[in-house]
Image (tube, grey):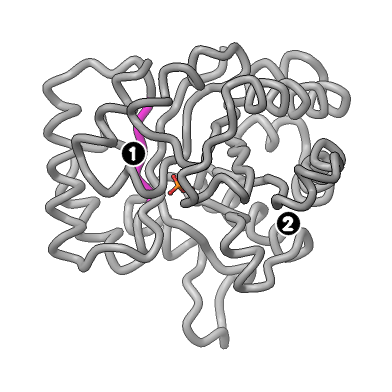
Amino acid sequence: MRKNIVAGNWKMNTTVPEGVALAKEVSDCLAGFKANCDVVICVPFTHLVPVCGAIDQAVLGLGAENCADHKSGAYTGEVSAAMVASTGAKYVILGHSERRQYYGETSETLREKVALALENGLTPIFCIGEVLEERENGSYNEVVKKQIEDGLFNRSAEDFGKIILAYEPVWAIGTGKTATADQAEDMHAHIRKTIADKYGKEVADNTSILYGGSCKPSNAAELFAKPDVDGGLIGGASLKAADFMGIVKAF
Ligand code: PGA
């Protein structure tokens, strides 16, 4: 059966010393507590090596927030999936709305990134979600379905089984405006049906679908109680160990 997962997305926050201290604090909290879910932190590239050395990956998984859409070569400033994997990280967030919106990531580039992540043994946390206008004009189910089809449906069922999905309505990210638990559940059920129609019920039932967007200790339990919500991708609230642990404890 699918796993429950709470994953932090630090975004462009913390210096290396601050990040190492935060990661160690989270790892230490988890060492003394039997979490009912997998816990992961996704950190800036610069932090991967030192954070890997500071945490116990038996209790806290480590991931990057992005990787390149090329294998290697003359791509100044890019970081490849192989480089990420060589740090000891096991996960990579792909297709976050901030990457799609500010860095022009398309389904085409994301297909390359997913392929390279999988080739290098990384677990993609693949983000999807509609913007406010699409929520308001009622096209959100179609928009999210198309993001999944265009970004992921070229994969085999075996590959698809290695991917974690994160539904993040863009209007809820960093805005303090969370989707209601019912809105999240409706979308997650729609996503699971979309997967089932393509790969069958077993693959769909085994796929972890996380909710992201202003998830915090005060609303996590209600969201995670929904049958198709398998955890969260946590931005702002992952930057304080106590808040992040509060969300982990919601399971
Ligand atoms: P937020 O971000 O929790 O700060 O809304 C979530 C995300 O963007 O992954």
Whether label 1 lies within 8 Å of ligand 1 gets the answer no
Mark 2 element type? helix
- Find residue 20 and report its horizontal and vertical position in percent: 16, 55
Of residues 21 and 71, the one drawn nearer to the viewer in this rendering: 21
Q: Is residue 146 visible?
A: yes
Q: Which residue is drawn at 47% across and 71% down?
A: 79
Residue 61 painted magenta = no
Q: Earlier in the sequence, mark 2 or mark 1?
A: 1
- Find residue 39 and report its horizontal and vertical position in percent: 35, 31
**Would residue 224 appear left or right of 143 to someone viewing this image?**
left
**Would residue 135 appear left or right of 178 to someone viewing this image?**
right
Query: Which residue is tagged 1?
Result: 61
Say which quarter of the image contains residue 71. bottom right
**Would residue 125 appear left or right of 145 to someone viewing this image?**
left
Of residues 113 and 23, the one drawn nearer to the viewer in this rendering: 23
Q: Residue at x 24, y 63 (%)?
A: 14
Categorize mark 2 by other alpha carbons within 10 Å: few (<14), some (14-19), many (20+).
Answer: many
Magenta segment: 38-42
Q: Alpha-carbon distance for marks 2 and 1?
A: 24 Å
Amino acid on which disc 2 is placed: Arg
Amino acid on which disc 1 is placed: Gly
- Please tell me whether residue 243 is drawn above or below residue 192 in the rendered image: below
Q: Marks 1 and 2: in contact by CB < 8 Å?
A: no
Of residues 165 and 167, the one drawn nearer to the viewer in this rendering: 167
Query: Which residue is tagged 2?
Result: 111
**Would residue 129 appear left or right of 120 to someone viewing this image?**
right
| Main secondary structure type of the part rendered in magenta | strand
Q: Quadrant of the N terminus?
A: top right
- Please tell me whether residue 1 is drawn above or below residue 58 in the rendered image: above
Q: Is residue 163 visible?
A: no
